[in-house]
Amino acid sequence: MSDAHYASELIQDAFPTGAGRKAQAAIGEAFEALRRLERSLPAEVLRNRQRSWTERRVKAIWFREARRIDHYEIQDLTAIAVEEARIERQRLKARELRLEAFLAAHQEGANSAEREQKGRGTGGLDLPGNGGAFAAEDEDQTHWGM
């Protein structure tokens, strides 16, 4: 695997695309992260570099158009990939805690019988007269949602 492919994989793994984020948005986020990293470096380190990060450079690495990748670029990309992994790990831990709390609040047991007696059923969405499940097929449903 060439350095250009390795760098591209680093940046695409750290800033993946998906339904909520297109490639251009991911490239922009990667560029901002690299600029933040670059601003935190000492002036002596920056003087020894051939170039600073530009959005065009990040885009060239993303699409594997860069002919060569310098060592400091791999180091910077690795640093932001590690930072993004830490952030994602924190998000996943927070989500896990939220889901555990949700499951604990909705566990089957003594509390669920009390909740159903109060008319809460499944998350307070039960419909009157049918026990909170599905509407009867023979009922008139034209007035729903009005």
Image: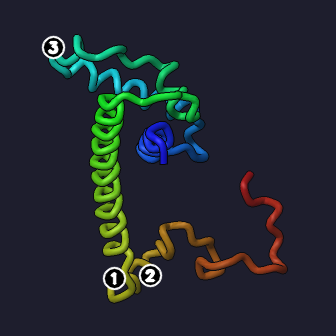
Q: What's the amino acid at mark 2?
A: Gln
Along the line of sight, which residue is nearer the eye, 81 or 125?
81
Along the line of sight, which residue is nearer the eye, 115 or 91?
91
Q: Is residue 72 visible?
A: yes
Q: What's the amino acid at mark 3?
A: Glu
| Residue 74 coordinates in the image, percent (x, y) | 34, 35
The colour mode here is rainbow
Q: Which residue is mark 1?
A: 111
Along the line of sight, which residue is nearer the eye, 123 or 139?
123
Q: Which image quarter: residue 15?
A: top left
Q: CA distance from mark 1 to mark 2?
A: 10 Å
Q: Are marks 1 and 2 in contact (CB under 8 Å)?
A: no
**Relative to 137, is 145 on the left or the right?**
left
From the image, state whether disc 3 or disc 2 is nearer to you.
3
The vertical placement of 74 against 34, above or below, is below
Circle on res. 44: 3
The vertical placement of 33 against 134, above or below, is above
Q: Secondary structure at mark 3?
A: helix
Q: Secondary structure at mark 1?
A: helix
Q: What's the amino acid at mark 1?
A: Asn
Q: Work out whether mark 3 precedes mark 2 in sequence or the reverse, and give the earlier one.
A: 3
The vertical placement of 66 against 138, above or below, is above
Q: Is residue 12 visible?
A: no
Q: CA distance from mark 1 to mark 3?
A: 64 Å
**Relative to 73, is 119 on the left or the right?**
right
